[in-house]
Every structure is written in C-alpha cells, then in structure tokens.
Image (cartoon, rainbow, N blue to C red):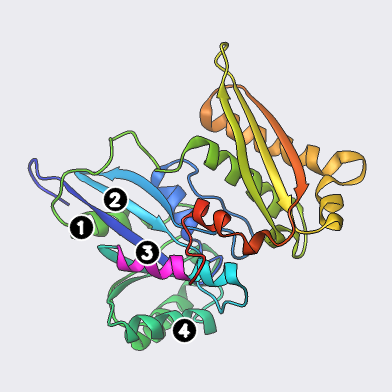
Amino acid sequence: MTQGNETRCGFVALIGAPNAGKSTITNNFVGSKVSIVSPKVQTTRTQVKGIGIWGNTQIIFLDTPGIFRPKRRLDRAMVGSAWNGVQNADIVVLVVDAKRGFDDESQSIAAELNKRQISAVLVLNKIDLVPKEKLLGLAKQINEAGRFDETFFISAETGECTAEFYDWLAGHLPPNPWFYPEEQMSDMPLKLLAAEIVREKLFLYLRQEVPYELTVEPELWERRADGSVRAEITIYVARDKQKVIVLGAGGRMIKKIGQAARQEIENLLEDRVHLFLFVKVRENWQEDAGRYAAWGLDFNV
C-alpha cells in the first residue's frame, strides 16, 4: 500500500473470455452496479469504467467485453474494444473462470498476450465453485502458457480473497493524483446506466438469440419537480417477430422487464422512477455506424 500522503491512480484492464466474471469484479470493487451482468455470455458490449478508492489509491477498472471468435461486425467491434482497453491500461488482468478452466478462448487470449509481449496478472475467479485441490494445477497450467506477474484466487461473487487482489493493484499503480472525484463510481451517465439495466433484464428474461439481436437506447431522462425521474427508453429489435417476443402475450413480458428494471434503478438512485419502455423495429441496426459511436465502438474494425 502507499505510504504517507502519496496518492496513486491508474487503469486496470480486465480481459477474459465471455462470462468469466469481469463485470462482477468491477461491481464488487466499486460497491455498486456500474456494469451489467447476466448468466448469458457477451453481455458487456463496450468498455465500462468502475472507479473506486483503495487506501491512497484510486483504481479505475476497465471492464471490457469478453474476447471470443467474432462472427459479425458487432462481435468484431466488441473484441476490438477489449484489446483497446489493454493498450490504455497500467495493469492488465486476465480473468479466467476457474470452473470452466483453461478453455480454448482463454488459451487464445493468453497466446495473444504473448504475441503482443504483454505481461499480465492472472485472476482465477469463481473459486467457490471449484474444489481447492484443482486450483493449483490450473494456475500452474496457465502460468506455463503465459507471462504473468502474479496469480490470485478469488470469488468476485462472494468477495472471497478479493482484498488481497485489490491490495496488490493499489501498490503497483503509478503515483498520480486521482483522476476522478472521490465519490464518483463510473463515467457512465445515469440515463445510459438505466438503459444498460433494461438490457440486462432483457438478457435475464428472454431466451436464445433475441437479446443479442436488440439494442437499447435512452430517449428521455428528466428530473421532475417532486424529485422523481421520468425515463423513456426504447428497445430496438431487428424483426417484427422479435418485437412480439419482447412484448409478450398481452404485454406481460415487457411489463415484467420494466418492473424489474425500475426497481433496480430506483434502488441505485434512491429516488422514485417513472420508467416507460417502447419497443420498435429497426432493421439492420447492427450496420448503423451511429449506434457504434454511441457505445464508443469502432464501426470499421
């Protein structure tokens, strides 16, 4: 840890295969939701900054999209965003799902780190789901395949052993003034975070490929005289039949999604929220450069 009045600050890029737990680590450190999570892979679409203080150090986590073999333009843009996070980081952390092991996707990421001559920190996450005797063998296998400065065994979900990981990061970031105010937890505007929470609920309640075929955009975020917020958010789908699925029979699905999202947004804001969701068809939205710009993704990657 830092000593005296010296402050440290820097960027820590979390990379890994989809659903390795990068967003859960970010939220665990910040102590509040700044990045959405779901059991489905490829939930995170762009870099999300999670900002927190650890001792005299401000740690800025770059929660990046999961790295996988891209098939579509959006896939390529997401993977490109993840590797851009590596370039902008003081420390790179490879997060591996300990239950899934050193699978093909994690092996590919380790190989790419080697190719780029990037040293990283290895984090084996979800250790609460794996017999302890298997962890050392897994760590040895991964360390033999890459260049890792340190290895940590954590469970971001339960918080087990995360303090040791944060201690190490705080001691290895460069001396700097803090880049953000002490109370700031993310650089994402509230209206965008609200839209992301809606998208999280879509991932949670909708099955198969529908969540991957839609995008969510905030249209209105208005603070009212009584202190409450009126939020209007549009869900764009690619085809009419997807709109029917999102709405559900008698509008029951969209109502269920809206209620869950509103409750979570209210808990974050500690204020009443009037949430209005609209579902519209926008064909070929994945080929719309403006959507990529709004997420900070490179359309031409």
Q: Earlier in the sequence, mark 4 or mark 3?
A: 3
* SS type, badge 3: helix
Q: Earlier in the sequence, mark 2 or mark 3?
A: 2
Image point (48%, 45%), residue name: 34
Q: Which residue is mark 2?
A: 59
Query: How many numbered marks have been drawn onto this rendered protein structure?
Result: 4
**Percent from the top left, x then y, of residue 126?**
50, 64
Main structural element of the magenta stretch: helix, strand or loop?
helix
Crowd around label 2: few <14 · some 14–19 · many ≥20 (10 Å): many
| Residues drawn in magenta | 80-88
Q: Amino acid at mark 2?
A: Ile
Residue 30 on image: x %, y % = 40, 44
Q: Tag 3: Cα neighbours inside 10 Å, few (<14), some, or many (≥20)?
A: many
Viewer-side residue, 217 vs 22: 217
Please identify, in this view, whether the residue under mark 1 or under mark 3 is nearer the observer. 3
First-in-chain label (1 vs 4): 4
Q: Position of residue 108 (x, y in %)?
A: 47, 84
Q: Which residue is mark 1?
A: 173
Q: CA distance from mark 1 to mark 3?
A: 16 Å
Which secondary structure lies at badge 4? helix
In the image, taking residue 10 as reference, residue 157 lies left or right, namely: right
Q: Which numbered dot is residue 108?
A: 4
Name the residue carrying label 3.
85
Q: Nearer the viewer, mark 2 or mark 3?
A: 3
State which tag comes first along the sequence, 2 or 1: 2
